[in-house]
Image: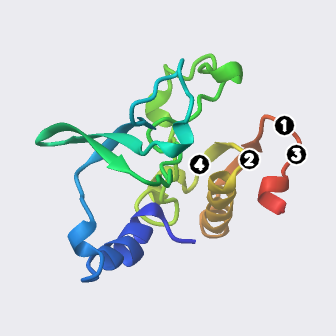
Amino acid sequence: FPTADDLVALYLEPLARLPELSPVIETGARVTGISRWGADKVRGGGREARPFMLVVETAGGIRRDRARAVIDASGTWRTPNPLGAGGIAAEGEAEFADRIAYGIPDILGRDRALYGGRATLVAGSGHSAANALLDLARVADDEPGTTFIWTTRGTDLVRIYG
């Protein structure tokens, strides 16, 4: 399975260099808000007919752009779920933050030394957790002492197994 770095280097960057796409791709920008132009949370009549308003931060400042459609593929990369129930951090989570990897670590590559020969807890029931488990199993085949425990909030694993 490709890592996020692989996806960027092997797919997204070559795609962005295509002459048909490169003039309309902007890098170094971060969308920090999306709403409907001229609408607010209280008065929502006709929202579906209004264009989207994007708040965009760049090195040059903040601007507002209009868009007919928005595809939100942001995931939770910068806002991972805490390990505790109810949307709060688990007891001890803040104290051990330097030993917790949120997101998708490169277990078979760059981060391998952090996982080989150690015990690792994988928390989650999504594809990121499943990929981490598969990678840890491969590391365990090569490096004695590599163990892992998988924990989920519930018992329904249909998202992983289909």
- In the visual, does 68 lie left or right of 154? left
Spatial CA distance of label 4 from label 3 is 28 Å
Give the mark nearest the N terminus, 4 or 2. 4
Query: Pointer 4 and pointer 2: residues touching (CB < 8 Å)?
Result: no
Q: Give the residue number, with chain letter if any, for mark 1.
A: 154
Q: Answer yes or no: do the residues labelled 1 and 2 have beta carbons within 8 Å?
A: yes
Q: Where is residue 104 in the image (x, y as percent from the top left)?
A: 52, 53
Q: Which residue lies furthest to the right in this view?
A: 155
Choose mark 4 or mark 2, whichever is in front: 2
For the N terminus, the image quarter is bottom right
Q: Is residue 116 above or below residue 64?
A: below
Q: Nearer the viewer, mark 4 or mark 1?
A: 1
Please name the amino acid that badge 4 sits on: Arg
Residue pictured at 38% horizontal, 51% vertical: 67
Q: In which quarter of the image is residue 32?
A: top left
Where does the image place residue 16, in percent across and percent down from the top left?
30, 73
In-front residue for pair 137/102: 102
Between marks 4 and 3 in the image, the one whose residue lies nearer the viewer = 3
| Figure check: 93 above or below 61 | above
User: Mark 3: which amino acid?
Assistant: Asp
* Tag 3–tag 2 contact (CB < 8 Å): yes
Which numbered tag is attached to residue 75? none
Q: Decide which of 35, 4 is in the foreground and name it.
A: 35
Distance from disc 1 to disc 2, alpha carbons, whole Å, reads 8 Å
Q: Earlier in the sequence, mark 4 or mark 3?
A: 4
Residue receiving disc 2: 125
The residues tagged by marks 3 and 1 sit, at their Cα atoms, a distance apart of 6 Å
Residue 27: percent from left, percent from top: 24, 57
**Kind of residue indicated by mark 2:** Ser
Name the residue type under label 1: Gly
- Per the image, the residue denoted by label 4 is 118
How far apart are the two marked residues, 4 and 2, measured between alpha carbons?
22 Å
